[in-house]
Image (tube, grey):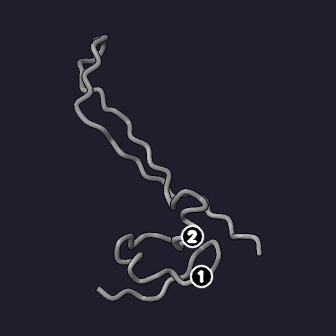
C-alpha cells in the first residue's frame, strides 16, 4: 500500500514510508517518538463482571484506552 508523504508534527522532518506502513496513524518521526515517548498514552483498565453489590472481584476482560498526546513543536 503506497501512502502519501507525511511530515512530523514536532520537527517537520519527513516520516519514512516504512513507519507509515507499520503505524498509519502516527504523527511523529522515529527520533521525536523516542524523545517524547510515542504518539499515544495507553492505559489498560480491568472490567469487573461480578454481580453488583458483591465484594468479590471478578475481572473478565480488560479495556485498552488509547489517547493521543498533545505534541508541542520542537524548539529550533
Residue for badge 1: 13
Per the rendering, the mark at residue 56 is none
The residue at the far right in this view is 76
Q: Could you tell me how far apart the alpha carbons at marks 2 and 1 are, in whole angstroms?
A: 10 Å
| Residues packed near mark 1 inside 10 Å, few (<14), some (14 to 19) or many (20 plus) | some
Query: Where in the figure is residue 18, as x and y percent of width and height?
Result: 38, 80
CB of mark 2 within 8 Å of CB of mark 1? Answer: yes
When asked about the image quadrant of residue 46, the answer is top left
Circle nearer the viewer, 2 or 1: 2
Front-most of 62 and 14? Answer: 14
Vertical side of 39 occupied by 14: above or below:
below
Residue drawn 48% across and 53% down?
67
Front-most of 50 and 11? Answer: 11
Residue for badge 2: 31
Vertical side of 40 occupied by 2: above or below:
below
Secondary structure beneath dot 1 equals loop
Secondary structure beneath dot 2 equals helix
When asked about the image quadrant of residue 19, the answer is bottom left
Q: Earlier in the sequence, mark 2 or mark 1?
A: 1
Which of the image's four quarters has the N terminus?
bottom left
When asked about the image quadrant of residue 22, the answer is bottom left
Amino acid at each position: 500500500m503506497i501512502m502519501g508523504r507525511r511530515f512530523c508534527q514536532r520537527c517537520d522532518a519527513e516520516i519514512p514510508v516504512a513507519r507509515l506502513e507499520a503505524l498509519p496513524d502516527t504523527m511523529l518521526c522515529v527520533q521525536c517518538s523516542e524523545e517524547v515517548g510515542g504518539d499515544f498514552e495507553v492505559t489498560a483498565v480491568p472490567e469487573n463482571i461480578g454481580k453488583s453489590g458483591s465484594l468479590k472481584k471478578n475481572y473478565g476482560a480488560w479495556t485498552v484506552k488509547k489517547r493521543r498526546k498533545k505534541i508541542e513543536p520542537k524548539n529550533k
